[in-house]
Image: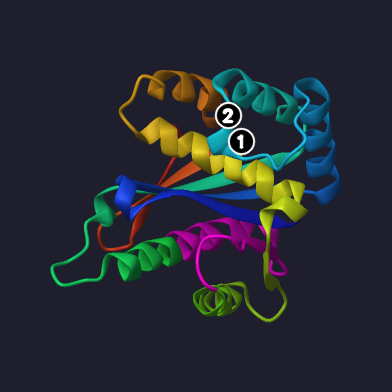
Amino acid sequence: MPIYCDESGGVGRGVMTLAALSIEPGAAETVLNRFREVTGLQSELKGSRIDLAERALLFEILKPTDWSATIGIAISALAPEQGTDRGDHDIAIYAALLEDVIGAVLPASGSCASVVIDDGRYGPETLALIRNDIAKVIGPCGSAQLELSHRLPGLQIADVIANTFFNRALVTERQARMAAIVAPFLESGKIRLRLLSRHAKSDDQNGE
């Protein structure tokens, strides 16, 4: 089962999240097509562009599908050390989240995992280095590739999941609603959380 990875937030926002979604391509396409039928969405599905009702609908459509997700969250790790370039630090946090989350997902996925990473955040050279690092984590039996999210339903769904947990972590008027939407999936173990510390170590958590 492929693992689709997408992120939300960043150093400038105070929180970065990364979702690793395990779902079959056909199942992801079915979920996205159903969402489009109900909402009339024509463009790419993006977590930053949908309202709370649409977000809740997507999770409701996902509920009976065979899928799981691991979410990496970086909060305390976001403050760069003195003299560190903010852009470089953002990349370092992203790479640490990706490596940690993929490392956590691999035991359940077997040794021949196929990881698909969103190609939209950084430049091609940076992403190529990150892909190579993930390839080393996966090992010779698996694969790591970069894809633009508009081409793959799995990446679009991963984007919504990552964005939901980004908004769940922010103290805003929407925080409680975001938490309520994902609470059943945290309680059931369908979604697992990993909190990245300042030193890029993480704690595996189910829920709060």
Q: Name the residue: 22% across, 62% down.
A: 80
Q: Which part of the image, by quadrant, shows the C terminus?
A: top left
Q: Tell me residue 169's x, y (percent).
A: 37, 35
Pick whichever, 21 or 125, lies toward us.
Answer: 125
For the residues labelled 1 and 2, say whether their Cβ atoms are less than 8 Å apart.
yes
Magenta segment: 97-123
Position of residue 117 measured from the top left corner of the image (x, y, whole percent): 62, 62
Which quadrant of the view contains residue 158?
Answer: top right
Q: Residue furthest front?
A: 42
Residue positioned 28% across, 55% down in the render? 78
Give the CA distance from mark 1 to mark 2: 5 Å
46 with respect to 37 (left or right): left
Q: Mark 2 belongs to which amino acid?
A: Phe
Residue appearing at x 68%, y 60% in the figure? 148
Q: Nearer the viewer, residue 35 or 77?
A: 35
> Please, what secondary structure does the residue beneath circle 2 have?
helix
Q: Nearer the viewer, residue 151 or 42?
A: 42
| Magenta region includes residue 48 | no
Q: Is residue 120 magenta?
A: yes
Q: Amino acid at mark 1?
A: Lys
Give the total of numbered labels.
2
Task: Kindly identify which residue carries mark 2.
Answer: 185
**Which mark identifies residue 190?**
1
Q: Earlier in the sequence, mark 1 or mark 2?
A: 2
Q: Is residue 40 left or right of residue 98?
A: right
